[in-house]
Image (cartoon, grey):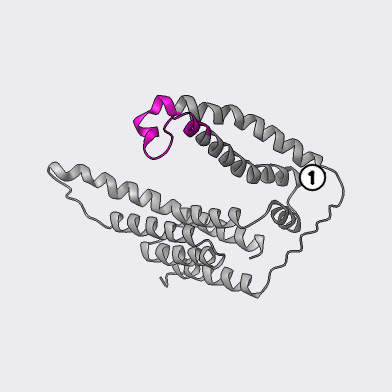
């Protein structure tokens, strides 16, 4: 898909939070947002998001007693509804940022005439989280080499140890990573004035328009009172 079509899906997913759509429209749009994830080959991510949304939907539909000793159970459906409303944003965000290279994203933003002052921070953010995830993997490997538990429920069982061996190194390294990525972006000429060229050829095709229209229809029908 064209990066601009992915950004459209991400924007629409964020609009769901402001439009307060009903459960039927939300479930239909979530299924449509999951479709590009499966079509792009992200089967594991698609199945994981599907199971999480199904569990949250089932939990939010439970009606606990409003009186008596079990009234406190009403907090769980409320939490499930809050997380469920954020899930379309996570789905479209995961699809957009895991299937788009920084070069494609840069070319798309320039086609949209976005200022360079906005493009450079966006590119740094896109490169930041994968780099931070790689650092987290190295930290876990180093902990395993020294016989320090780091997987499973060890952060919950040993919170102080996790803070010392995982969180603190990640936070200390995050500033260095952000600075290095910013320098790398400026070295590649992203901050140079004038017209920029790109070797990445992007164009919105018929499949992109079809998916954007298909995902926009349920929201339009809801706003017009059809759904």
User: Dividing the picture into quarters, in which one does residue 6 lie?
Assistant: bottom right
Residue found 55% across the figure and 27% down from its top: 169
* Residue 20 shows in this picture: no
Q: Quadrant of the N terminus?
A: bottom right
Which of the two residues, 110 or 104, is positioned nearer the viewer here?
104
* Residue 53 shows in this picture: yes
Rendered view: 225 above or below 94: below
Is 59 placed left or right of 3 in the picture?
Answer: left
Q: Residue furthest right?
A: 194
Pinpoint residue 16: horizontal percent, then vertical percent. 47, 57
Which of the two residues, 149 or 107, is positioned nearer the viewer here?
149
Residue found 21% across the figure and 42% down from its top: 72
Q: Residue furthest left?
A: 68
Residue found 81% across the figure and 39% down from its top: 187
Near mark 1 (Cα within 10 A), the count class, few <14, some 14-19 or many ≥20, is: some
Q: Bounds of the magenta span? A: 142-162
Rendered view: 100 above or below 222: above
Pinpoint residue 132: horizontal percent, then vertical percent. 59, 38
User: Dividing the picture into quarters, in which one does residue 209 lie?
Assistant: bottom right
Which of the two residues, 95 or 161, is positioned nearer the viewer here?
161
Is 224 placed left or right of 76 in the picture?
Answer: right
Was residue 214 drawn as part of the magenta stretch in this picture?
no
Pinpoint residue 204: horizontal percent, then vertical percent. 69, 68
Is 14 placed left or right of 118 in the picture?
Answer: left
Which of the two residues, 174 or 109, is positioned nearer the viewer here?
174
Query: What secondary structure is found at the residue carrying circle 1?
Result: loop
Q: Quadrant of the C terminus?
A: bottom left
Residue found 65% across the figure and 75% down from its top: 206
Is 66 placed left or right of 41 in the picture?
Answer: left
Residue with the mark numbered 1 = 190
């Amino acid at each position: 898909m064209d990066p601009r079509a992915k950004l459209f899906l991400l924007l629409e997913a964020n609009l769901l939070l402001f439009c307060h759509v009903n459960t039927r429209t939300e479930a239909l749009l979530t299924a449509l947002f999951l479709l590009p994830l499966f079509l792009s080959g992200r089967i594991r991510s698609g199945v994981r998001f599907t199971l999480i949304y199904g569990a949250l939907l089932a939990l939010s539909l439970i009606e606990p007693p409003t009186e008596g000793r079990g009234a406190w159970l009403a907090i769980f459906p409320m939490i499930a509804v809050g997380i469920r409303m954020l899930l379309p944003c996570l789905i479209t965000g995961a699809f957009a940022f895991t299937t788009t290279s920084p070069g494609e994203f840069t070319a798309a933003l320039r086609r949209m005439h976005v200022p360079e002052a906005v493009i450079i921070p966006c590119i740094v953010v896109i490169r930041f989280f994968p780099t931070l995830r790689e650092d987290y993997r190295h930290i876990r490997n180093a902990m395993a080499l020294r016989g320090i538990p780091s997987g499973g429920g060890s952060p919950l069982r040993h919170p102080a140890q996790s803070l010392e061996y995982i969180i603190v190194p990640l936070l200390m390294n995050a500033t260095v990573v952000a600075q290095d990525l910013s320098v790398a972006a400026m070295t590649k000429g992203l901050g140079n004035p004038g017209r920029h060229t790109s070797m990445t050829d992007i164009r919105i095709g018929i499949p992109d328009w079809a998916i954007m229209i298909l995902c926009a229809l349920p929201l339009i029908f809801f706003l017009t009172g059809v759904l």
